[in-house]
């Protein structure tokens, strides 16, 4: 069999031309298209990864901000609760203090009224008893009230215990032997002399007496030595009555306080 080398060469040339044409006009565009597609896909994948990373970052940022917001919200809520509790306690304390102040003011008012009533009753009682006693004693025939009071006072001075005498002597040294004698009436000279005599004897000193009159003594006599006082008067007997009247007034007052205050 003879080989036609011209035909073989022509076929090889044709094949090479076909291959070049395919490579030039078919394979290369296809490969370029494939490369371009791969590059687009790679870019999209990179963009997707970047988007994923950004999304994760935004998610973490959101979670952080949400946690911080919840913490801030809890802190604000706790602060509001504490402020409300403190305000409630303050208002309760103020209300209780106001109630206590009102109660104390009411009690002070009642006590002041009671003291005023007691003072009026005591004053009226002393005045009425004094008037009654004066009238009764005046009606007694041949009785000298002032003289009898002087006698009783002298008897009391004579009966002073040693402790009282010592105390009077100490006051007497500070008073430089000056003694004030006060009475509700003008003492006659004999009574003055009698009082001086018993004082000189009781205090073992020669005293300088200054006699004065004072209506508030309520028919009685008192001596004052450098602030220390010894007295006897009808007022001494009214003190028990005043105390009884005060106790009678305090009893209902305490019952009223237990019910209303």
Image: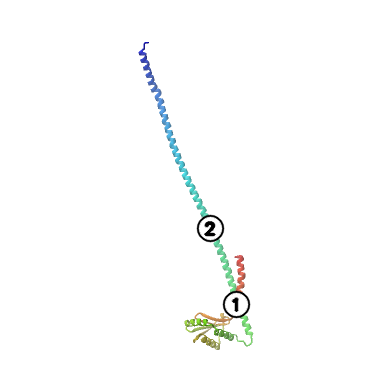
- Give the left or right position of residue 95, taking residue 14 as reference: right
Dot 1, crowdedness within 10 Å: few (<14), some or many (≥20)? few
Q: Quadrant of residue 19?
A: top left
Quarter holding the C terminus? bottom right
Q: Which residue was labeled with disc 1?
A: 240
Provide the residue designation for mark 2: 89
Q: Which element type, helix, strand or loop, lies under badge 2? A: helix
Q: Nearer the viewer, residue 220 or 68?
A: 68
Residue 110 drawn at (x, y percent): 59, 68
Q: Earlier in the sequence, mark 2 or mark 1?
A: 2
At 61% from the left and 66% from the top, the residue drawn is 258
Instruction: Please determine whether, in this image, residue 102 is positioned above or below residue 233.
Output: above
In the rendered image, the vertical position of residue 65 relative to residue 158, given as above or below: above
- Residue at 47%, 45% (x, y): give it: 65
Position of 151 compared to 57: left or right? right
On screen, residue 91 versus residue 139, left or right, reads left
Q: Quadrant of the N terminus?
A: top left
Q: CA distance from mark 2 to mark 1?
A: 51 Å
Number of other residues with Cα within 10 Å of mark 2, as a class: few under 14, some 14 to 19, many 20 or more: few
The residue at 42%/30% (across/down) is 38
In percent of width and height, residue 91 lies at 54, 58
């Amino acid at each position: 069999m003879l080989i036609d080398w011209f035909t073989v060469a022509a076929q090889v040339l044709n094949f090479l031309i076909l291959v070049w044409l395919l490579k030039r006009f078919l394979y290369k565009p296809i490969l370029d298209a494939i490369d371009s597609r791969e590059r687009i896909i790679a870019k999209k994948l990179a963009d997707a990864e970047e988007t994923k990373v950004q999304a994760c970052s935004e998610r973490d940022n959101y979670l952080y901000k949400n946690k911080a917001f919840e913490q801030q919200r809890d802190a604000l809520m706790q602060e509001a609760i504490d402020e409300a509790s403190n305000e409630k306690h303050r208002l309760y304390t103020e209300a209780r203090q106001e109630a206590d102040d009102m109660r104390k003011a009411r009690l002070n008012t009642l006590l002041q009224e009671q003291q005023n009533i007691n003072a009026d009753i005591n004053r009226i009682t002393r005045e009425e008893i004094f008037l009654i006693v004066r009238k009764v004693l005046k009606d007694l025939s041949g009785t000298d009230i002032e003289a009898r009071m002087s006698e009783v006072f002298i008897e009391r001075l004579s009966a002073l215990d040693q402790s009282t005498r010592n105390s009077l002597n100490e006051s007497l040294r500070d008073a430089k032997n000056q003694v004030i004698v006060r009475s509700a009436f003008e003492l006659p000279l004999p009574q003055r002399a009698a009082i001086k005599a018993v004082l000189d004897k009781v205090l073992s000193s020669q005293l300088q007496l200054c006699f004065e009159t004072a209506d508030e003594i309520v028919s009685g006599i008192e001596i004052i030595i450098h602030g220390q006082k010894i007295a006897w008067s009808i007022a001494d007997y009214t003190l028990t009555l005043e105390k009884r009247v005060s106790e009678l007034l305090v009893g209902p007052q305490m019952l009223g306080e237990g019910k209303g205050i």
